[in-house]
Amino acid sequence: MKSYDVIVIGGGLQGSSCAYQLSKRGHKVAIIEQNDVASGTASHTDGYVGFSEKAPGIDALQGWHSVKLYHELQHELSYEIEFEPTGFMYVCETEREFAAASDYAKKIRDQGFDMTVIDPKEMCELEPNLAPDLVGGILNKSDGLANPYRVVFAFVNEAKRNGADVYTHTTVTDIKRNAKGEVEGVVTDRGDFLAPKVVNACGVWAPFIGKMVGLEIPIEPRKGMLLITEKAEPVTQSIEVLEFGYWLAKFFADFKRPVSELVEKHNVCLNIETTMSGNTVVGGCRLFKGYDIKSEYEIMQAIAERAIRFYPMLKDMHCIRSFGGVRPFCLDHLPIVSGVDEVPGFYIAAGHEGDGVALAPITGLLIAQIISGEETPFDASPLAWKRFEGVDLATLAEHP
Ligand SMILES: Cc1cc2nc3c(=O)[nH]c(=O)nc-3n(C[C@H](O)[C@H](O)[C@H](O)COP(=O)(O)OP(=O)(O)OC[C@H]3O[C@@H](n4cnc5c(N)ncnc54)[C@H](O)[C@@H]3O)c2cc1C
């Protein structure tokens, strides 16, 4: 039976990052992945890397650390991850949104991070193809984009160079524990593997792994969809653009925008970027529909309608494909990145909702530091499993 220091379940963004950071510290690591690496939500996602999509506080703080790590990783990893610090702009359609955005920008600035409020003239200078009637926006220059597939493969390759083993098409079906309840390894459909430490990095599937050790992990799949246009003259100039309603919809489901019934019904908000290959990626939506990731025609229509509202030139462009995916949404809006006291040797790195690309570097680092007994770059206790101690999870279950 193969034996390791740490087994990471899940070869997605978090799992590969954990494996990289752990193997870099000399731990003997195995990644166990039920399909291929980067086959879960990592293969159905956009590549925005930012701290400014987060709530002020611990959320923005972990985002800021992760973006900083991306700046370093692009040189540290031997495989190209297509990280580009493009900057990022939220645009506002109404005065009410602009007031909320300005307040948000102030809170982010108060935390010591960069976020400028800009008027419509400055906005249109940066993004000349935007609709001319928008009321203003907020801007940050350190955020960027990365290629999520490449990020996973870069981490996996580097982990392998550090001696990690990667078992694909191998499904974890149970966690082995001794009489004291301590983790001893995993049971898979291809045999058992031993390790005193196991990291659950299974994204939307993390609750199934949690059940194997008696934990109810409050993560639910939250659907998103994206449209890809033909290659054409760039729609956005060099920056990632979102409507501020996107941020509001992420955190406040009752925030109402002046939108059509179709857009409202599917909780659609604009996010848009022009990729290195010249296609434009347009999103998106946030919906609770179980694990269903199929593209839905009506949602495609709603996304297109919303995108044309902000970038009228899109009405003359062809959409060449669309795909859906599910975000691992943790019911209290924060990922879980920690050990679990009641199950010694069991760790969770999951629940990153729409930020798992952005947060993968810091998540891997935190898990590796926690396991290695190192000091973390900030107090990561708000991300710990412990926060659910004594909490009735049903009280968290009202979707935002
Ligand atoms: C449409 C869309 C757009 C998005 N845009 C962005 C964005 O711009 N920026 C951003 O930061 N985030 C974005 N996200 C969110 C981001 O993609 C996710 O947060 C991230 O992919 C989650 O990473 P993960 O490693 O937790 O999960 P995954 O990448 O899903 O990895 C989990 C892995 O665990 C494996 N697994 C599950 N069960 C088992 C088992 N029993 N045994 C072995 N292996 C198992 C799965 O096969 C999977 O490969 C977006 C998501 C969607 C859907």
Image: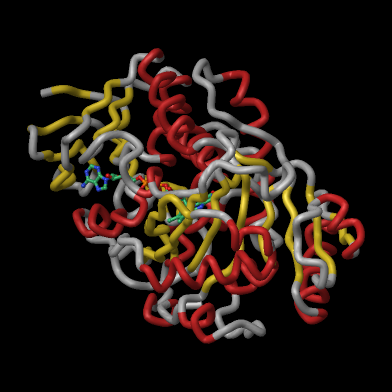
| Residue 177 at least partly seen | no
Side (left or right) of 176 relative to 91 = left
Q: Position of residue 377 (x, y in %)?
A: 65, 38
Q: Is residue 14 or residue 23 the one in the foreground?
A: 14
Q: Residue furthest front?
A: 316
Q: Is residue 93 or residue 172 the one in the foreground?
A: 93
Q: Which of the 4 image quarters holds residue 32?
A: top left
Q: How is the image coloured?
A: secondary structure
Q: Residue at x 79, y 50 (%)?
A: 140
In the picture shown, does residue 179 fall above or below 227? Answer: above
Q: Position of residue 165 (x, y in %)?
A: 27, 21
Q: Residue at x 66, y 72 (%)?
A: 245
Which quadrant is home to the N terminus? top left
Side (left or right) of 297 relative to 230 = left
Q: Which of the 4 image quarters holds residue 275?
A: top right
Side (left or right) of 99 relative to 163 = right
| Residue 350 at least partly seen | yes
Q: Residue at x 16, y 41 (%)?
A: 171
Q: Position of residue 325 (x, y in %)?
A: 38, 56
Q: Position of residue 247 (x, y in %)?
A: 64, 67
Q: Is residue 349 or residue 240 the one in the foreground?
A: 240
In the picture shown, does residue 99 fall above or below 53? Answer: below
Q: Is residue 162 or residue 98 the one in the foreground?
A: 98
Number of marks: 0
